[in-house]
């Protein structure tokens, strides 16, 4: 199958491309100028230069393709640079859907996020919902994936928490640290996208993708500590009555580590039941504690 991919140079995108090529698919990846070196040289990979924000970049780009995969996404806005949830999650989706319809592509896969819902509390999830609504109304043969926190050796999530545990004698924790999450391996997320291409029963379905274990944030830090050989992590729990006003005040500072929206999502937790996703696509979700040991051993 010939597959068109946006967001292929990102953390998840690179793994999706890797697995698509390993499965024998032909891939055409839309890549912004200057990012070509993030992708491998492969006889089945065709690099198409452009930007999904610009509809003109997609004119003719999907010709000959049988499926499209939308992986463009951000976790933090930079409005001064024109990087917004609306532009990256909604406009790029609208542009790709229109291009797919105009160029005869029927199969369409969308990356969303666990926790996405109509009455979401944060701009991130609200924009993901608007993107989903466009997909559901498109008339195409669509499938939507909603992953939890995605982890992997090259991912920001692993690097951020491992740096905290490695470098700080006491790790600051927002609130009581009891909010729960079920991180999912990037390899498993990508496997679902690839498998969906040949599973017509997944058309018109939305799948939540989570790991097999639900951990509190405190437990997750201890899992990093154990994998790094540091044991139980010393933690300083910070009262939310102090944290929230500070985040609201400083979230606009470029290097401040968290926004109010990210704090809200963290406190909401990030768990789901992965049974439907794992059984449909034959995935046995990887356990983060085991993967962390392997990641840090290498």
Image (cartoon, rainbow, N blue to C red):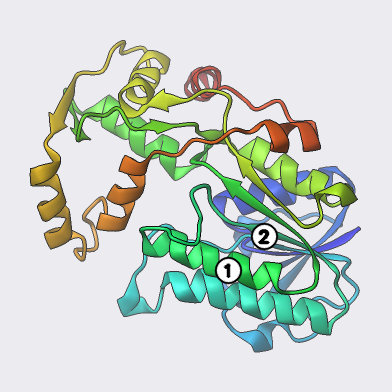
Which quarter of the rendering shows the N terminus?
bottom right
Q: Earlier in the sequence, mark 2 or mark 1?
A: 2
Instruction: Tell me the element at label 2.
Output: strand
Q: Which residue is mark 2?
A: 110
Q: Is residue 219 above or below residue 173?
A: above
Give the residue at x 49% y 31%: 182
**Is residue 89 in view from this perspective?**
yes
What residue is at 73 percent from the left and 52 percent from the top? 17
270 over 257 or under it: above or below: above
Which of the pair 241/62 is nearer the observer? Answer: 241
* Pointer 2 with pointer 1, Cβ within 8 A: yes
Element carrying mark 1: helix
Image label count: 2
Residue at mark 2 to residue at mark 1: CA–CA distance: 9 Å
| Camera-nearest residue between 8 and 92 | 92
Residue 142, position as x, y percentages in the image: 77, 62
Location of residue 236 in the rendering, given as x and y in whole percent from the top left corner? 14, 27
The correct choice, above or below, for 164 with respect to 146 in the image is above
Query: Which residue is at a point 30% across and 24% down the rendered structure image?
Result: 218
Q: Which mark is residue 131?
A: 1
| Nearest to the observer: residue 116 or residue 2 | 116
Left-right relation of 135 to 244: right
């Amino acid at each position: 199958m010939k597959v068109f991919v946006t967001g292929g140079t990102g953390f998840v995108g690179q793994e999706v491309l890797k697995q698509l090529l390993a499965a024998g698919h032909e891939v055409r990846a839309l890549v912004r100028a200057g990012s070509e070196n993030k992708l491998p040289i492969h006889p089945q990979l065709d690099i198409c230069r452009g930007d999904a924000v610009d509809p003109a970049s997609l004119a003719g780009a999907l010709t000959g393709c049988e499926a499209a995969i939308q992986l463009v996404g951000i976790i933090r806005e930079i409005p001064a640079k024109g990087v917004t949830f609306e532009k990256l999650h909604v406009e790029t989706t609208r542009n790709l859907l229109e291009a797919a319809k105009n160029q005869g592509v029927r199969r369409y896969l969308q990356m969303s996020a666990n926790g996405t819902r109509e009455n979401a509390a944060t701009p991130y999830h609200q924009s993901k919902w608007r993107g989903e609504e466009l997909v559901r109304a498109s008339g195409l043969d669509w499938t939507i994936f909603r992953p939890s926190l995605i982890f992997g050796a090259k991912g920001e999530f692993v690097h951020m928490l491992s740096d905290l545990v490695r470098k700080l004698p006491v790790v600051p924790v927002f609130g009581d640290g009891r909010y729960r999450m079920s991180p999912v391996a990037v390899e498993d997320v990508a496997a679902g996208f690839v498998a969906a291409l040949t599973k017509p029963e997944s058309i018109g379905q939305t799948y939540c993708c989570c790991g097999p274990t639900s951990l509190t944030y405190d437990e997750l830090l201890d899992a990093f500590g154990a994998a790094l050989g540091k044991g139980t992590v010393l933690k300083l729990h910070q009262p939310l009555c102090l944290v929230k006003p500070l985040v609201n005040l400083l979230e606009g500072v470029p290097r401040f580590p968290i926004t109010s929206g990210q704090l809200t999502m963290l406190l909401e937790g990030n768990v789901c039941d992965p049974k439907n996703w794992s059984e449909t696509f034959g995935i046995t979700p990887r356990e983060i504690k085991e993967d962390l040991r392997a990641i840090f051993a290498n």
